[in-house]
Image: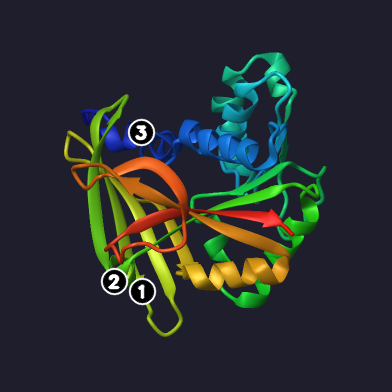
Amino acid sequence: MKRKTKPTLAEQADRHVLYELSVQCSEAEIDFVSETYEQLRGKPARLLREDFCGTANVCCEWVRRHGDNRAIGVDLDQSVLDWGVKNNLSKLGAEQRARITLLNEDVLTVETEQPDILSAMNFSYWLFKDRQTLGNYFSRACQALKDDGILFLDIYGGYESFRDCEEEREIETPHGDVTYIWEQASFNPITHDLTCHIHFHFEDDSRLDQAFSYHWRLWTLPEIRELLEEAGFKTTIYWQGWDEDDEPDGDFHPATDADADAGWIAYIVAEKR
């Protein structure tokens, strides 16, 4: 009789749980968008729309913050939305769940109630690789927002973003310490096509390779600002600060110039004109 082998840690792991632990910090994201909106508008935002919402982790965090907060999540992948309902919305109370609407639709064509905040994070909009399509998305975002609404995006860059490379860091998970690996697998300097993968390496030496893969265009900050302004926005760049050990401090402040770092990350705050 063939002995059953114990599943490896990689085989037991849920890639969406690992993603939320390694990549997504919904608390910090909501801190930034809610605080920045209130600073700019002098009032709290109440309706947030998250495009490319995935597991709706951010939507859940938003409704937890205040009893009047409502969220709309939009994503093309029904299976990921279903995972979010089972694993994230299920942790909310019934009243909180009732304040979230998840739509399995295309962000380029979806019609929703006008939000105060439209959020498109984790560089998801980079899947639009040509100016016409990305410009169309920004135009529709501008039309979708309330008159005093704000679009929030994130972006990364720096000279290391233009080459093949890998970065690793340790994360704590239910399966012990896991090595998160971000791989920029290929970059075409002529088209700026960029292919990236996320891998996970576990304590038993098993691996979850290409848990997530992305095929993007590496857009530059000036290109994005120009497209946003053509769509009807005015933009402010919020640049990440650094602590005394030259490590990112997690605080973002308005900036008009910055150092040419190897790698940087920033928020783009786009207000309707």
**Is disc 2 in contact with disc 1, using a CB cutoff of under 8 Å?**
yes
Looking at numbered disc 2 in the image, what kind of residue is underneath it? Arg
User: Hey, what amino acid is under mark 3?
Assistant: Ala
Report which quarter residue 87 is drawn in. top right
**Could you tell whether 108 is left or right of 209 in the image?**
right
Residue displayed at 71% across by 46% down: 104
Q: Residue at x 31, y 63 (%)?
A: 259
Where is mark 1, residue-wise?
A: 187
Where the C terminus falls, by quadrant? bottom right
Marks 1 & 3, CB-CB < 8 Å contact = no
Q: How many numbered callouts?
A: 3
Circle 2 crowding by C-alpha within 10 Å: few under 14, some 14–19, many from 20: some
Image vertical order of residue 101 relative to residue 238, above or below:
above
Mark toward the viewer: 1 or 3: 1
**Above or below: residue 249 compared with residue 136:** above
Q: Earlier in the sequence, mark 2 or mark 1?
A: 2
Residue holding disc 3: 13
Q: Is residue 219 visible?
A: no
Q: CA distance from mark 2 to mark 1?
A: 6 Å
Please state which of residues 264 and 200 is positioned toward the viewer in this rendering: 264
Mark nearest the camera among 2 and 3 is: 2
CA gap, disc 2 and disc 3: 30 Å
First in residue order: circle 1 vs circle 3? 3
Front in this rendered view, residue 68 or 148: 148
Residue count near mark 1 (Cα–Cα under 10 Å), binned few <14, some 14–19, many ≥20 = many
Q: Which residue is rendered at x = 26% and y = 42% of the image? A: 243
Q: Nearer the viewer, residue 217 or 27?
A: 27
Query: Can see residue 95?
Result: yes
